[in-house]
Amino acid sequence: MCLEIHTDIANCLHQGKNVIVHSRKSWGRAPTVLATYLLRVHPELKPDVAIEHVRNICGRHAVQTVKQYNHIHEYYEHLVQSISSQKSKDGRASPIGSY
């Protein structure tokens, strides 16, 4: 699901469109999607830095639950493993942030 949403966000941004990501109060789901998107397009970021960026924009309540926090960290680990796997296949880093 995140990959679909990330792809839609990236496509809109590449077309010069504005993107609004919103959930009920924009404290849980939307910030979680935004944090994982930041990790995808900026693979040098660590999960806590991505969360902090999102909290600076959405407010300190963004990413409310342990489940959301863990999802962001698990997503980061998935990206790291994907990059490592790609490096071992062809000796170079995969453009994770590319769409």
Image (cartoon, rainbow, N blue to C red):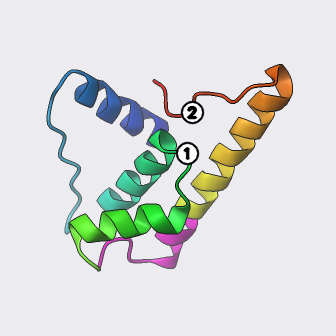
Label of residue 69 in the image: none
**Percent from the top left, x then y, of residue 71?**
55, 62
The amino acid on which the numbered mark 1 sits, given as a three-letter code, is Pro
Q: Can I make out residue 27 in this image? A: no
Label of residue 43 in the image: 1
Left or right: residue 57 versus residue 31 is left
| Magenta residue check for 55 | no
With respect to residue 98, does 35 lie above or below? below
Residue at horizontal 27%, vertical 24%? 14
Mark 1 residue crowding within 10 angstroms, few (<14) / some (14–19) / many (20+) = some
Q: In the displayed orientation, state which residue is furthest to the right.
A: 88
**Percent from the top left, x then y, of residue 56?**
27, 70
Q: Which of the 4 image quadrants contains residue 53?
A: bottom left
What kind of element bears circle 1?
Answer: loop
Circles 1 and 2: CB atoms closer than 8 Å? yes
Q: Which of the 4 image quadrants contains residue 54?
A: bottom left
Residue at horizontal 81%, vertical 20%? 90
Residue at horizontal 65%, vertical 28%? 94
Instruction: Tell which of 57 and 74 is nearer to you.
Output: 57
Instruction: Tell which circle, 1 or 2, labels the residue nearer the N-terminal end.
Output: 1
The amino acid on which the numbered mark 2 sits, given as a three-letter code, is Ile
- Estimate the spatial distance between the alpha carbons at disc 1 and disc 2, rounded to whole Å: 7 Å
What kind of element bears circle 2?
Answer: loop
Left or right: residue 10 versus residue 58 is right
* Residue that badge 2 annotates: 96
Q: Which residues are magenta?
A: 61-71
**Percent from the top left, x then y, of residue 49?**
47, 65
| Magenta residue check for 68 | yes
